[in-house]
Image (cartoon, rainbow, N blue to C red):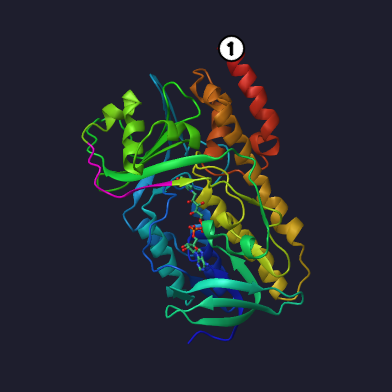
């Protein structure tokens, strides 16, 4: 039976929930995870960044992830018409893991959750959180629906919201604020890619800019076993104009507009379900107080272009557990200064990169042929997820650095 009371309730068993649950359990706290779905379940977000391996390792999941046969990843490649460039994540400014994996999230997320369970974490699938009463002083009550549809409650000292796009606490506590980003849409599917070209590097995500409209881009994320994830991102309006009847048609229509991708994928078989998501960028007024913290996508989500989502999710889990463990042990903590501000520092680094991507500045920078090795290593670090390393000038002063570099590249070009 579900206990009446625990130290920490975690909402959601995705990457942030799984990591947080294991880290809390290892520190001796009682924790329960409520997950609305049965795993495995589909999730978007398939290209990981090396920085996230630090948290996978910290949680004790690294051997299982390494042995699972996921597609190895060591960098990111970019293409625009005839232009192409790539970043090798092992050539980077910051210390730490330089490689990672590209994963079908259904299998990856289940593996993380299974590892947490092996460490003794109590995960309840098909249990959905419907309400949360938070009280200063720590007497919190969370309401959940059982698989049979009965409504029950559990008391806890703290709630971690790892519900991703479910955004459970932002909705219940009225924390949502609009994102600064315009509404964009992504359409995507999996394919049997049939790629024969030996020039194609399966160890890297390929991000391709649309030949004419530079704010439209595609991802091609190779998996092991001859499959890829393929998707396109653009403003809702631009995609609507294509007049496609289904998400699959939209993906195919858009791929046909890129001669390079159309050629690369000429033997691809489109036989898996396709989907689309609109308006996924989001933000909140506050990420935490003494009763709750928002992890990963339940807090802020920027944009998929740099594959930063899972890394931010895992980083937030690790940082929140650090603060929470102190609080549960009776120490005074300051969620604003110890969690929200330092977490947002790295998110803001990515924000500058995302802005520069859609302005075209970042594209000018990476396709500029005579980039200094030093600068490329600093950029490579951010693309590898090391967006919190303040020794990197692109973290310390991202906006100023990005602007200066873009000016240099455009004046030298
Ligand atoms: P999730 O992985 O979303 O997990 C949340 C869990 O909470 C789910 O299992 C859900 O069922 C559960 N839940 C929800 N509501 C409730 C409830 N009421 N009660 C109980 N459980 C609940 N990130 C990358 O790192 N790489 C990429 O290449 C990438 N590509 C992306 C492409 C697109 C188009 C988009 C939109 C996002 C992409 N992302 C990518 C982001 C990535 O999907 C997320 O950042 C990541 O999944 C967040 O992890 P999480 O642990 O916060 O939440």
Give whichever of 88, 238 is nearer the camera. Answer: 238
Give whichever of 342, 169 is nearer the camera. Answer: 169
**How many marks on residues?**
1
Q: Quadrant of residue 130?
A: bottom right
- What residue is at 65 percent from the left and 47 percent from the top? 178
Q: Is residue 284 above or below residue 77?
A: below
- Residue, disc 1: 412
Residue 79 shown left or right of residue 386 in the figure: left
- What residue is at 30 percent from the left and 50 percent from the top? 273
Residue 375 shown left or right of residue 121 in the figure: right
Q: Is residue 170 above or below residue 368?
A: below
What kind of element bears circle 1? helix
**Residue 166 visible somewhere in the drawing:** yes
Q: Is residue 305 above or below residue 273?
A: above
Percent x, y for residue 145?
A: 50, 77
**Quadrant occupied by the C terminus:** top right
Q: In this view, does 191 lie above or below 59?
A: above
Percent x, y for residue 123?
A: 47, 74
Percent x, y for residue 350?
A: 60, 40
- What residue is at 56 percent from the left and 27 percent from the top? 362
- What residue is at 50 percent from the left and 38 percent from the top? 305
**Chief secondary structure of the magenta span?**
loop
Give whichever of 111, 296 is nearer the camera. Answer: 296
Q: In which quarter of the image is residue 361?
A: top right
Residue 373 shown left or right of residue 273 in the figure: right
Q: Give the range drawn in magenta.
A: 268-276
Is label 1 within 8 A of ligand 1 (CB to nearest ligand atom)? no
**Residue 388 visible somewhere in the drawing:** no
On whether residue 175 falls in the magenta region, the answer is no
Residue 360 shown left or right of residue 81 in the figure: right
Percent x, y for residue 18?
A: 49, 65
């Amino acid at each position: 039976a579900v206990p009446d009371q625990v130290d920490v309730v975690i909402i959601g068993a995705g990457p942030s929930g799984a990591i947080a649950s294991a880290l809390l359990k290892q520190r001796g706290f009682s924790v329960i995870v409520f997950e609305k779905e049965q795993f495995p379940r589909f999730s978007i977000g398939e290209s990981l960044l090396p920085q996230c391996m630090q948290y996978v390792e910290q949680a004790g999941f690294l051997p299982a992830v390494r042995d699972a046969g996921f597609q190895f990843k060591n960098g990111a490649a970019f293409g625009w018409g005839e232009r192409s460039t790539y970043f090798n994540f092992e050539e980077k400014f910051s210390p730490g893991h330089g490689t990672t994996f590209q994963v079908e999230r259904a299998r990856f997320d289940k593996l993380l959750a299974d590892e947490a369970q092996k460490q003794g974490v109590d995960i309840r699938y098909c249990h959905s959180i419907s309400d949360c009463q938070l009280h200063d002083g720590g007497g919190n009550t969370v309401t959940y629906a059982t698989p049979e549809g009965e409504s029950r409650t559990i008391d806890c000292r703290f709630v971690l919201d790892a519900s991703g796009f479910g955004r459970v606490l932002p909705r219940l506590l009225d924390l949502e604020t609009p994102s600064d980003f315009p509404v964009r849409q992504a359409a995507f599917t999996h394919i049997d890619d049939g790629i024969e070209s030996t020039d194609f590097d399966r160890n890297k995500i390929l991000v391709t800019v649309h030949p004419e409209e530079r704010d439209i881009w595609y991802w091609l994320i190779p998996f092991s076993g001859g499959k890829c994830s393929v998707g396109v991102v653009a403003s809702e309006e631009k995609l609507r104009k294509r007049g496609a009847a289904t998400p699959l048609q939209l993906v195919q229509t858009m791929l046909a507009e890129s001669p390079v991708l159309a050629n690369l994928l000429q033997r691809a078989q489109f036989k898996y379900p396709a989907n689309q998501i609109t308006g996924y960028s989001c933000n909140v007024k506050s990420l935490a107080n003494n009763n709750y913290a928002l992890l990963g996508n339940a807090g802020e989500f920027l944009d998929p272009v740099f594959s930063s989502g899972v890394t931010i999710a895992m980083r937030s889990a690790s940082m929140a557990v650090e603060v929470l463990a102190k609080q549960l042990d009776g120490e005074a903590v300051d969620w604003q200064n110890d969690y929200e501000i330092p977490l947002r520092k790295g998110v803001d680094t990515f924000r500058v990169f995302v802005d520069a991507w859609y302005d075209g500045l970042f594209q000018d920078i990476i396709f500029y042929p005579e980039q200094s090795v030093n600068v490329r290593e600093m950029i490579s670090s951010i693309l590898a997820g090391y967006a919190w390393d303040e020794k990197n000038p692109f973290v310390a002063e991202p906006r100023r650095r990005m602007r200066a570099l873009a000016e240099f590249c455009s004046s030298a070009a």
